[in-house]
Image: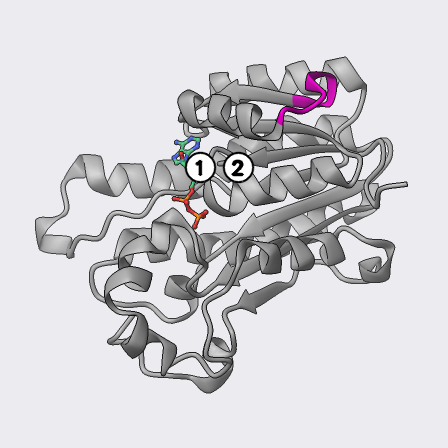
């Protein structure tokens, strides 16, 4: 028996990186998984790689910043299986830019994908979670807890996830829906490719555990949040960062 047998799980941003790993690990643990991503080709590649039972591994090429697309995909999953147990608001995009050089398009993209996207996904999922309870996992960032130049719009959107986690936890508690969040430092994903390839040494010396995070670390935390062992935990954001948050390291280097 897998740990998440018969659970219905939605992972956004499942085409690569942490989202892809989360989707695969939930599937391996017996869940029905709905994978949402802007990049349909990457979703097709994940299906080719996993060669899953497509009855419980469903892909949707969806822009999470488009409420209509989100609702249509989530309604499809909710209606097919009659419930949604777990939503992981993982899709994200990071473009750096100081305020003076940021364009309207750039600023909007950071907020629309990283903040509005989770709101749309959560709004669409809750009706399918209310009857049985469930878990919503949000993804913040070290750039929310340690703001840095050039990442204002992204960091503000990700800081918003910490607030939404608390508010949704309180609002949805009556339905036994728990809402928790993690704030990654540097995870070994395409988003951190440049850092890991070109600045590994200077970054590692700022991480007390002296390694980058792996996508399996994300699954371990998410799987704990969604387990009965965490049944009294809601509204929390935990750093998944090898100790950066604990050290209060000055942020200039991030
Ligand atoms: P991470 O470190 O979070 O894994 P990645 O950049 O590797 O970061 O993965 C983020 C995922 O989110 C990618 O698969 C990307 O296609 C997806 N994504 C980005 N923007 C959107 C969007 N607007 N709608 C849906 N998925 C998106």
Residue 177 on the magenta segment: no
Q: Does the residue labelled 2 lie within 8 Å of ligand 1?
A: no
What are the residue bounds of the magenta stretch?
A: 51-57
Measuring from the top left, give residue 147's x and y in whole percent.
33, 68
Q: Residue lying furthest right in this view?
A: 1
**Horizontal side, residue 194 vs residue 223: left or right:** left
Q: Could you classify mark 1 by the number of other residues whose Cα lies within 10 Å: few (under 14), some (14-19), or many (20 or more)?
A: many
- Please tell me which residue is depicted at 37% across the width and 63% down the height of the picture: 143
Pointer 2 with pointer 1, Cβ within 8 A: yes
- Please tell me which residue is depicted at 63% across the width and 24% down the height of the picture: 51
Residue placed under numbered mark 2 in the picture: 119
At mark 2, the secondary structure is: helix
**Horizontal side, residue 29 vs residue 155: left or right:** right
Front-most of residues 197 and 245: 197
Measuring from the top left, give residue 10's x and y in whole percent.
64, 32
At mark 1, the secondary structure is: helix
Q: Quadrant of residue 176?
A: top right
Displayed-image quarter of ligand 1: top left
Measuring from the top left, give residue 196's x and y in whole percent.
33, 62
Measuring from the top left, give residue 82's x and y in whole percent.
81, 19
Residue 54 on the magenta segment: yes
Report the Cα–Cα distance between label 2 and label 1: 5 Å
Front-most of residues 36 and 26: 26
On screen, 219 above or below 52?
below
Residue placed under numbered mark 1 in the picture: 116
């Amino acid at each position: 028996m897998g740990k998440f047998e018969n659970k219905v799980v939605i992972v956004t941003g499942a085409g690569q990186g942490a989202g892809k790993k989360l989707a695969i690990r939930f599937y391996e643990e017996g869940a029905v998984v709905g994978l949402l991503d802007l990049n349909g080709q990457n979703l097709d590649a994940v299906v080719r790689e996993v060669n899953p039972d497509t009855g419980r591994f469903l892909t949707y090429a969806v822009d999470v910043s488009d409420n209509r697309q989100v609702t249509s995909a989530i309604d499809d999953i909710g209606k097919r299986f009659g419930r949604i147990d777990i939503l992981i608001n993982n899709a994200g995009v990071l473009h750096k830019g100081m305020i003076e050089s940021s364009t309207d398009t750039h600023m909007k993209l950071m907020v629309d994908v990283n903040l509005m996207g989770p709101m749309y996904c959560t709004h669409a999922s809750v009706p399918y979670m209310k009857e049985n309870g469930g878990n919503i996992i949000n993804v913040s960032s070290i750039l929310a807890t340690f703001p840095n130049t050039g990442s204002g719009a992204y960091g503000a959107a990700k800081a918003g996830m910490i607030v939404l986690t608390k508010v949704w936890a309180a609002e949805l508690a009556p339905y036994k829906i728990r809402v928790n969040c993690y704030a990654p430092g540097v995870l070994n994903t395409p988003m951190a490719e440049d850092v890991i390839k070109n600045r590994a040494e200077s970054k590692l010396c700022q991480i007390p555990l002296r390694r980058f995070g792996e996508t399996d670390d994300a699954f371990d935390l998410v799987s704990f949040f969604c387990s009965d062992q965490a049944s009294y935990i809601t509204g929390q954001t935990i750093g998944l960062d090898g100790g950066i948050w604990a050290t209060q390291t000055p942020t200039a280097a991030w």
